[in-house]
Amino acid sequence: MSARRRGLVIAGCALALLAMPSAAGAHAALLSSTPRWGVILGTAPHSLTLVFSEDVVPRYARVDVVTAHGQNLAGPPNVTGSTVVVQLRQGRLGSYTVRWQMVATDDGHVTEGAYSFGVRVKPLPPAPASGVGVPIAPQLLAWLQFLGVVLAGGMLTFRAIVWIPARRVLGLRDIGDAPPAIWMGVAGAVLALHVGVLAFLAGAYPIVGGGLLNFVNTEIEPIRVGTHLGQAWMLMTFAWLGVLALLVAAWVTPRKRESLLASAGVVALGVAFGLSWASHPASRGGLALIADYVHLVAAALWVGGLLVLVMLAAATRSMPRSSREAIARTCIARFSSVAVPTVALVALAGVYLALRELPGPSALFSSGYGIALLVKSAVVAGALGLGAYHRRLVVPRLTAGAPVASIRGTLTLELGLLVTVLALAAILSQTAPPT
């Protein structure tokens, strides 16, 4: 066989191999729908038409059109090739959820999806499918996302506000705390990025009706584009990638390290807006949304500030005691002055959100949301008490020359209480407020 012929054979085999995945990977994807997703109609439709990218098996076609009250108005689907038509019983004004499941004629793969439309009202996000869930606790995912915001946002931003100015006052250039700060920021950003993906899947798949094992074949486009959950996930994903890029740049450019670290912290705190946007307060209006975001950012700065103090204690361990004491006193004094407005924002925003979410005082004791809020408030009160104790009694003693070791126990307790507060906040974020 000549070299030219061998080349033609190899090229033909390569083309065949490239063509095989596209043929084997074909699925019945939804191309168009009438009514389309997100539309607001003037009258209830009498039929629903779905057009797919390839022919579907009539026997296995399933379509439900469910009202907000759970009533299914869809009749049996009529399949003609790739077009599915469903006659609908007469409906009323309100939001409708369309849920479909199809089997492709060519490859036998199952695809499924969901979207919503409204009749004279704005459509709500698709109603969750009964009996479908993701075996991951949403409370744990929310707590891990909060922790990522604390590590990458609260810690780096507080470090720029407190430690960098204190270092200039003390005449210090570098004590080796920047690399640990970078790694903690990277850990927070990576954690929040990956947990955000899992949280989106945990919220989307019960709505669509799929599962993690059917990830490729479940169409989540309406959820990704048409709901706050999906929109927040998209924005946060790109923003966390931006935070990681800034942290990498800080690692490789020592001259601009501090400015890049501060920028990464500010962007990370900005990412936290997505968590508020996809939470319960977002449905209560713009002021409640802003209050929830301020509450989260202030808490992240508070916890992040305590972590900065812990990190500095580790970074200065090899320094003379007098230098360690001077650094600790300066940072604790600055921390105390910044913590006062931060704590005030946490308390004020928390009280406002509680008043907006609770229909009355009795809901504090008659609902799971109210009881969780009471427990969280008690823990926050303990942390506030410790903060006031540090501000009024401990900081003046440190300024007068008392050893810094006298504050370690209470600072550790305050940090533990605040981590507990974040866990309770995660539980509240996944608990429906009483009506």
Image (cartoon, helix red, strand yellow):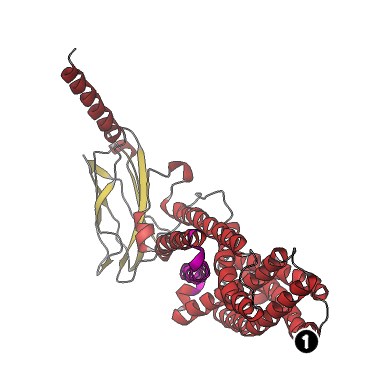
The picture places residue 20, in percent across and down from the top left corner, at 28, 30
Please indicate whether residue 164 sits to the left or right of residue 213 in the image.
right
In the rendered image, the vertical position of residue 161 relative to residue 144, given as above or below: below
Between residues 370 and 384, which one lies in front from this camera angle? 384
Answer with left or right where residue 217 lies relative to residue 35: right
> Is residue 106 in sight in this rendering?
no
Stretch of the chain drawn in magenta: 252-281
Q: Secondary structure at mark 1?
A: helix
Residue in front for this viewpoint, 300 or 122: 300
The percent coordinates of residue 431 (x first, y second) are 58, 65
Question: Label 1, on which residue?
Answer: 396
Residue drawn where x is 66% and y is 76% of the image? 364
At which x and y percent is residue 163?
A: 62, 75
Q: In the figure, residue 1 lies in which quadrant?
A: top left
Q: How many numbered markers are drawn?
A: 1
350 w.r.t. 10: above or below? below
Asked if 84 appears above or below 164 in the picture, the reply is above
The answer to whether residue 75 of the structure is visible from this angle is yes
Q: Quick check: is 95 in the magenta stretch?
A: no
The quarter of the picture where the C terminus appears is: bottom right
Which amino acid does the dot numbered 1 rest on?
Answer: Pro
For residue 213, side relative to residue 112 (left or right)? right
- Residue 197: x percent and y percent? 48, 54
Magenta span: predominant SS is helix
Residue 276 is covered by the magenta coloring:
yes
Q: Nearer the viewer, residue 424 or 194?
A: 194
Q: Quadrant of residue 230?
A: bottom left
Q: Which sits in the foreground, 275 or 160?
A: 160
Please indicate whether residue 49 sits to the left or right of residue 193 in the image.
Answer: left
Q: What residue is at 52 percent from the left and 56 percent from the top?
A: 190
